Amino acid sequence: MSFTLHGITVSSGIAIGHAHLISRTSLEVAHYVLPKQFIDEEIARFDAALQATRNEFASLRSNRPTRAAAEFDAFLELHQMILDDPLLSVTPREMIASEHCNAEWALKVQTEALVSQFDEFEDAYLRERQTDVKQVAERLLKQLLGQYGHQLPTARHDVEMILVAHDLSPADLIQFKPHQYAAFVTDVGGATSHTAIVARSLDTPCVVGLRHARELIREDDLLILDGEQGVLIINPDKPILAEYKLRQSEWELERKKLKRLRTARADTLDGTAIELLANIEKPEDVAEVREHGATGIGLFRSEFLFLNRDVLPNEEEQFEAYRTVAAGMDGQPVTIRTFDLGADKQIKGAERVANNPALGLRAIRMCLAEPQLFRTQLRAALRASHYGNVKILIPMLSSISELNQTLQFVAAAKQDLDAEGIPYDREVKIGGMIEIPAAALALNVFAKKLDFLSIGTNDLIQYTLAIDRTDEDVAHLYDPLHPAVLYLLAHIISTAGRFGVPVSVCGEMAGELPYTRLLLGFGLRQFSMFSAQVPSIKQRVLTTSLPEIANLTQKILRTDDPMKIRDLLHRLNA
Ligand code: PEP
Ligand code: MG
């Protein structure tokens, strides 16, 4: 039966492919229905993973440090007992046999059932033991995934697949990066959540906030994702499928044409040079930056080096990552944002639960609270500055004392490097993200002390309108055209101009066509976005005359009727 679901567009494009469902908890696993003849093999695979996990415990026990605390033995014993309990070692085998599902899925479902039983215990100690069950199950699951990993590409990559999940964290999505899914869809999430941002960076169509997709869609259902309209069509009729195949090839043709602009300068019709920079998450993204013709990196979200890891990257590893990017960009600017950890980007194993994560210990607040973490990063970034044109960008500044402390950290890191005789760029520029209304309104103080500014519209909108960017229930209220947002944007750009401090926008607005002329009209000359968005924004810049848009943009700024703002914007883009 064909049916349609509506969600929030996150990354445009059209994808046609078969559904691939993943489960809803932290370690995402796939669900396969196996042909009968493979069931014995699957059970044997489960048994082998069990044995490998037992061996792992045995080796932990024999290699434990001699001075290890007695608790270590007790902990190992407990985990071994949990592993050998029939509820974990036998029930999943039975599920594989009766439901013909893959071993990972059986284990996952059984773990979830067990964990939910623990929730009902009154005794806090017993309730807490669910963590042990989860840890043992994850160990076993990792063994299974390790064994399965090499089979995944050949088994599933002959057809286009669309990943269907209840939710995906930014870390999950990064993990799926190498698997080349044609599209991602999720039940929850807002358009500027970090998950959405990662999907966009993968240049993969994505729709979030579909609410019940994960329940309604079956493994292997044929799906059409219309990333323009935010629509997902499940098991389409033949004429619809034919229509979308046509639209998909038209879309791809258009993108190919735009790519020809790669080496063109981004000048407006009146000859004003506009800088189009790229946002990246990993050193590997540099190739795409070059491919799409961005002239530098306006935002390197360095915290992505931390996600999906048990061991945090040390100074050497970070230095290598930053140096690779700096050298790879051949003298073009590389803006390393210091860690924006917290809220929806948590270090694995050190997740903090906060009442209001977006208002809590995030970004520069977290770095100042974890001096060692911050020092290490600053040293690594400064060392990399010797190999290219590195700038350092501080996220989420809200008070001048945070900025002062940060500048002291930078000065101390420089002093240490001097003392050790390690080279770095002495003129390295320090910039601040303006993404909290307080910083926007008190910009004078920040502009005096910083070398450059970058407007994080995703957070600026979130914090101005008090709308959680990850919550699909309030996604309809997330409005870049709200008069308060427009006022702040114009205010930041003109104040930066008065102080002679370069300013860019690196939030999603910078890569969205409807806003390009508006931001140009406000005086913006630097935009930073995902590489794949550069060609279409460049085309818009090339067809814009600044004198011609001046009146209309000022009129938009003076208007407070939302409908009128939209009408005027429409005229601006006509
Ligand atoms: C922003 O807030 O606009 C931004 C660019 O940073 P992030 O999306 O990583 O919070
Ligand atoms: Mg931000």
Image (cartoon, rainbow, N blue to C red):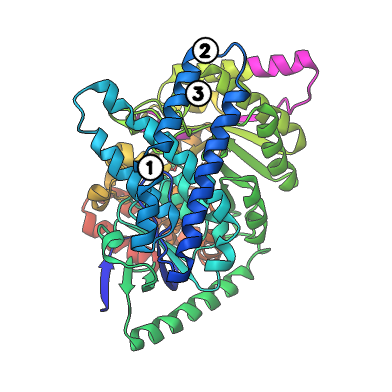
- The amino acid beneath tag 1 is Leu
Image marks 3 and 2: residues in contact by CB distance under 8 Å:
no
- The amino acid beneath tag 2 is Ala
Q: Mark 1 points at which residue?
A: 88
- Residue 387 location (% of width, % of height): 76, 36
Q: How far apart are marks 3 and 1 (CA)?
A: 40 Å
Q: Distance between the residues labelled 3 and 2?
A: 31 Å
Quadrant of the drawing holding the C terminus:
bottom left
**First reached walking from the N terminus: tag 3 or tag 1:** 1
- Residue 2 location (% of width, % of height): 27, 78
Q: What element carries label 1?
A: helix
Q: Is mark 3 on a helix, strand or loop?
A: helix
- Is residue 259 found left or right of 475 in the rendered image? right
**First reached walking from the N terminus: tag 2 or tag 1:** 2
Q: Which residue is at 29% across, 49% downward?
A: 478
- Residue 349 location (% of width, % of height): 46, 31
Mark 3 neighbour density, 10 Å: few (under 14) some (14–19) many (20 or more): many
Quick check: is the Cβ at mark 3 less than 8 Å away from ligand 2? no
Quadrant of the displayed image that contains ligand 1: top left
Q: What element carries label 2?
A: loop
Count all numbered tags in the image, as a single digit. Answer: 3
Q: How far apart are marks 2 and 1 (CA)?
A: 27 Å
Q: What stretch is highlighted in magenta?
A: 412-440
Q: Name the residue under label 2.
A: 69
Q: Which residue is at 33% across, 61% downward?
A: 98
